[in-house]
Amino acid sequence: MPKMKTHSGAAKRFKKTATGKIKRGHSMKRHILTSKATKRKRQLDKDTMVDKADQKRIARMIPYA
């Protein structure tokens, strides 16, 4: 049986935690930052977990992560 291939785009965006959950970053943090509040920018810096509805689909894209 051939090996599964990792989706390279997903591998760059998601990481698995030790408990098997999938971690992701926030969007809206790249440019036009002057119009965003400092608090908002700081909160966007923190990683968060992928929604339960998307977890299975993303886990399939990063089988070896």
Image (cartoon, helix red, strand yellow):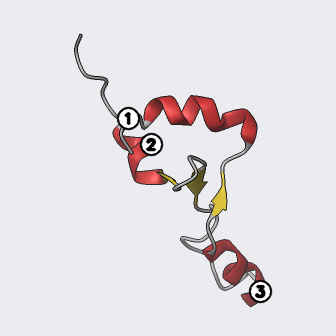
Question: Along the polypeptide, which appears first: circle 2 or circle 3?
Answer: 2
Q: Secondary structure at mark 2?
A: helix
Residue 7, numbered label? 1
Separation of residues labelled 1 and 3 (CA atoms)? 33 Å
* Other-residue count near label 3 (Cα within 10 Å), few / some / many at <14 / 14–19 / ≥20: few
Residue receiving disc 2: 10
Query: Which numbered disc, 1 or 3, marks the residue closer to the eye?
Result: 1
Q: Which residue is farthest front? A: 19
In the orientation shown, which residue stands out farthest toward the top? 1
Q: Are marks 1 and 2 in contact (CB under 8 Å)?
A: yes
- Determine the secondary structure under disc 1: loop
Q: Are marks 2 and 3 in contact (CB under 8 Å)?
A: no
Q: Mark 3 — residue?
A: 39
User: Does 46 sit above or below residue 37?
Assistant: above
Report the front residue among 15 and 29: 15
Give how far apart the Cα atoms at labels 2 and 3 are: 28 Å
> Residue reaching furthest left?
2
Q: Which mark is residue 36?
A: none
Q: Nearer the viewer, residue 45 or 63?
A: 63
Q: As shown in the figure, which amino acid type bears the numbered disc 1?
A: His
Q: Quadrant of residue 49?
A: bottom right
Question: Is residue 23 shown left or right of residue 63?
Answer: right
Specify the quadrant that holds the N terminus.
top left
Residue shown at 63% from the left, 73% from the top: 46
Question: Callout 2, which amino acid?
Answer: Ala
Instruction: Please name the amino acid that badge 3 sits on.
Output: Lys
Q: Label 3's element?
A: helix
Residue 28 location, x and y as percent?
64, 65
Residue 36 position by quadrant: bottom right
Image check: 52 left or right of 14? Answer: right
Q: Quadrant of the C terminus?
A: top left
Q: Does label 1 or label 3 sit earlier along the sequence?
A: 1
